[in-house]
Image (cartoon, helix red, strand yellow):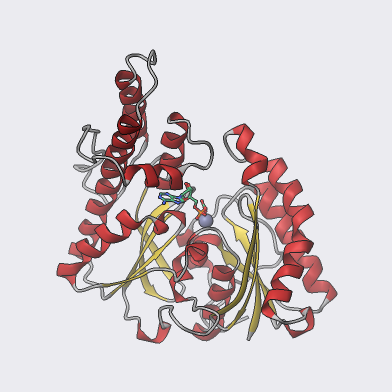
Amino acid sequence: MIILGIDTSCDDTSIAVSRDRTVLANCISSQDSVHQEFGGVVPMLAKREHHANFQPVLMQALTEAGISIEDVDRIAITIGPGLAPALEIGVELAEQLAATHSLPIEPIHHMEGHLLSSLATNQDGSGGLDPSTVTFPALGILASGGHTEIVLISDWGKYEILGETVDDALGEAYDKVARMLGLGFPGGGKLAQLASFGNPRAYDLPLAMLQSGDCNVSYSGIKTATKRLIYEVSQNATQTLTTEQTQDIAASFQRAALFTFLKKIQKVLEKYPVNNVLLGGGVAVNTVFQEELERLLLPYEAKLSKPVSSRLCQDNGAMIAVAAYIHSQAQYHLPIEKLDRRPQWRLDDYSSALDFSSAL
Ligand code: KG4
Ligand code: ZN
C-alpha cells in the first residue's frame, strides 16, 4: 500500500510517502527561520507558511519516492493535537488533494504517529521494529515540544496515558532554558549539545514530583530554578556566563529534567512488566536520554525501540503514513462524519473513539 502521510500540526510542513512501513520519502519544510525572531511559533504565520509550502513539499516527496500521485492508495493526515490554524490548513489542503484524485483520507492522531515512528523502516527496508514481534502490553515513551507521556499500549490502537506532564513538556523546558542561555529558538538540541561538555553535578536543581505517588512529571519548577541559577551564577546578571558555566548549567538542567522522567518510567515498569518499549518525539534524539533509558530497562529485560533516524523523531509525515499502515493491518479506523481539526485531542480519547471492527 502506498500512503501519502501529511503533518502540519506545528511549524513543519511535512509530507512523506511510504510503501507499507517502508519510508520512500520523508520531506520536511522547516519554518524555524520564520518564527525565530518571535522566540516561539506564531500560529497564523505557521498557517501562511504551510499554505505556501504544501505543493512544493508534495512534489518533492513524490519525486524522491519516484512515484506520481496516481500511484498513491490513500492519504493519512494529522487532524490533532496541535496548533489550530496549522492543522486547519493541512486538513483543508489534504481534503482537496483527496477529492481531486478520488483517494480515501485517513485521520491520524499526531501522538500515535510519534508512538509508532519506531516501526518505520529505511528506504531499503532495513531497520525499524517489526510490529509482529511486539508483545502486549507494551510501553510508549513520548517526549516532544508539546507532550511528555508514558503510554500503556495494550494493543495497536489501544492506548492509555499512565503518566504525563502537569505543565510544560520536556522539549518545551529544554527550549525555554535554551532561550534563557541565549541559544535561540528552538534551542533544545543546542542545549543538549552544550550539556555534553558540562558537569551534570555542578549545580543542584529541584527534582519535582518524585513523591507525588503518580507517574506524572512537572517541569515548571526546574525551569524557574534554572532561571534563578543563571541569575546567581551571572552575579545578578552583571556578568556574562563563561562557556564552562553555561555548559555546567545545561548539563545540570538536563540531569534534573531527565532524572524525574526516568524515575516515573521506572515506576510504571515496576507495575507493568513489558517486553517492548517504543520511544518517540523530538527529545528521543537525545543520546543521554536514550542511554539512560537503555540502562533503566536492562534489569526489566525490555527492548527499547527508537526511530531509525532523527528525522523520524521530529515532526514528520512518515510516522503518520506508518500509523495509517498499522490501522490497515490491525483493522481499525477512526469513524468520523466530517474531517476537522482537533487541536486539544488526547491520545486516550482518540483511542476510545476508534472502531476496531474494520479498517478504513
Ligand atoms: O516532536 P517534535 O519535533 O515537535 C513536537 O511535536 O513538539 O519535538 C520538538 C522538540 C523541541 O522542543 C526541541 O527542542 C526538542 O524536541 N529537541 C530536543 C533535542 N532535539 C530536539 N530536546 C532535547 N535534546 C535534544 N537533542
Ligand atoms: Zn510532534
> What residue appears at the point 81 percent right and 66 percent down from the top-left corner?
96
x, y (%) of residue 334?
A: 59, 71
x, y (%) of residue 102?
A: 80, 79
Q: Quadrant of residue 7?
A: bottom right
Please give left or right for residue 320 compared with residue 13 in the image. left
> What residue appears at the point 39 percent right and 21 percent down from the top-left corner?
240
x, y (%) of residue 48?
A: 76, 47
Give the camera-side residue of 339 and 295. Answer: 295
- The quarter of the picture where the N terminus appears is bottom right
Give the camera-side residue of 333 and 221. Answer: 221
Please give left or right for residue 100 compared with residue 262 in the image. right
Q: Is residue 217 visible?
A: no
Q: Is residue 297 above or below residue 330?
A: above
Instruction: Check the image and name the residue furthest to the right.
Output: 100
Say how many tags the image has: 0
Give the camera-side residue of 180 and 129. Answer: 180
Please give left or right for residue 175 compared with residue 276 in the image. right
Give the camera-side residue of 198 and 8. Answer: 198
Instruction: Check the image and name the residue furthest to the left.
Output: 299
Instruction: Check the image and name the residue furthest to the front.
Output: 243
Q: Is residue 68 above or below residue 159?
A: below
Q: Quadrant of residue 34?
A: top right
x, y (%) of residue 64?
A: 68, 75
> What residue appears at the point 75 percent right and 56 percent down from the top-left corner?
53
- The quarter of the picture where the C terminus appears is bottom right
Q: Is residue 141 visible?
A: yes
